[in-house]
Image (cartoon, rainbow, N blue to C red):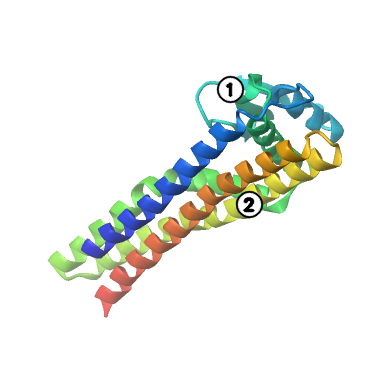
């Protein structure tokens, strides 16, 4: 277990560093005001219209960095700051979330796969580690095969969460690429504003990368514990 705690601690530290850097970047580029004077909401609405999407609503949602696209009710949800502000950070986030709406409209395969996994992961992710640990304890204490198979079931559940994390990577990177391409093609930003938006999205994507690596590392660790105990 000590090795696991060291692993989780290391991943947690990297995750905190990336998250902290992301917040600093957004704070920095929130001070770069857009010359075109458009708010995050207006940028989102224009990107949707330019892509022929008229059935998606742009709405404000409480909190910070709570921005997301909801494919169920077709809404681009922008945090209050992004929705109202007129800076490079707001432009980046608004365009990124619209990138997901464009993916949905164009039936982007990776987005479809991620959406299909959501109901599975929402059920299995919370219990996966407990099944693995419980199975290992049962196997060690009773010396029967049932504990082993419980652990294997936990690993399978954990595998779904890991798969979800890795499918999320192309979805997020593609949404950012779509956003940046649109911002540049439509000359929405000055070179300085565009550079800030690009840098902000780069750090946002790294949070997903760290999460995916963490999920894989955890899966491999517990896999070694389960199959190693079998031997």
Q: Residue at x 81, y 42 (%)?
A: 184
Q: Are marks 1 and 2 in contact (CB under 8 Å)?
A: no
Q: Nearer the viewer, residue 55 or 4?
A: 4
Q: Residues within 10 Å of mark 2 (few under 14, many from 20)?
A: some
Mark in front: 1 vs 2: 1
The image position of residue 165, as x and y in percent, is 52, 53
Q: Which residue is mark 1?
A: 81
Q: Nearer the viewer, residue 228 or 175?
A: 175
Q: In the displayed image of the protein, which residue is found farthest to the left? A: 141
Q: Quadrant of the N terminus?
A: bottom left
Q: Which mark is residue 113?
A: 2
Q: Residue at x 34, y 48 (%)?
A: 127
The image position of residue 15, as x and y in percent, is 42, 49
Query: Does residue 145 appear to the left or right of 90 in the view shown?
Result: left
Q: Nearer the viewer, residue 34 or 172?
A: 34
Q: Describe the element under mark 1 as helix, strand or loop.
A: helix
Would you say residue 224 is visible in this rendering?
yes
Q: Residue at x 70, y 43 (%)?
A: 195
Query: Does residue 7 appear to the left or right of 121 in the view shown?
Result: left
Q: Which mark is residue 213?
A: none
How far is disc 1 from disc 2 in space, using C-alphas?
31 Å
Write down the quadrant of residue 201 in the picture. Answer: top right
- Which of pointers 1 and 2 lies earlier in the amino acid sequence? 1
The image position of residue 91, as x and y in percent, is 69, 32
Q: Residues within 10 Å of mark 1 (few under 14, many from 20)?
A: many
Q: Describe the element under mark 2 as helix, strand or loop.
A: helix
Would you say residue 104 is visible in this rendering?
no
The image position of residue 136, as x and y in percent, is 23, 64
């Amino acid at each position: 277990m000590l090795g696991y705690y060291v692993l989780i601690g290391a991943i947690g530290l990297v995750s905190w560093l990336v998250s902290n850097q992301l917040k600093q970047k957004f704070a920095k580029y929130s001070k770069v005001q857009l010359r075109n004077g458009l708010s995050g909401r207006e940028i989102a609405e224009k990107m949707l219209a330019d892509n022929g999407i008229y059935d998606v609503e742009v709405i404000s949602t409480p909190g910070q960095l709570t921005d997301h696209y909801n494919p169920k009710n077709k809404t681009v949800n922008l945090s209050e700051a992004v929705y109202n502000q007129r800076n490079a950070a707001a432009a980046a986030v608004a365009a990124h979330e619209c990138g997901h709406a464009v993916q949905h409209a164009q039936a982007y395969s990776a987005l479809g796969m991620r959406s299909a996994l959501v109901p599975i992961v929402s059920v299995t992710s919370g219990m996966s580690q407990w099944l693995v640990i419980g199975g290992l304890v049962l196997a060690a204490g009773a010396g029967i095969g049932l504990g082993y198979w419980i652990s294997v079931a936990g690993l399978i559940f954990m595998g779904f969460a890991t798969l979800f994390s890795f499918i999320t990577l192309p979805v997020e990177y593609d949404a950012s690429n779509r956003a940046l391409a649109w911002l540049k093609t439509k000359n929405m930003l000055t070179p300085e504003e565009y550079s800030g938006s690009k840098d902000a999205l780069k750090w946002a994507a790294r949070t997903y990368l760290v999460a995916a690596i963490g999920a894989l590392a955890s899966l491999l660790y517990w896999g070694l514990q389960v199959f190693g105990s079998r031997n």
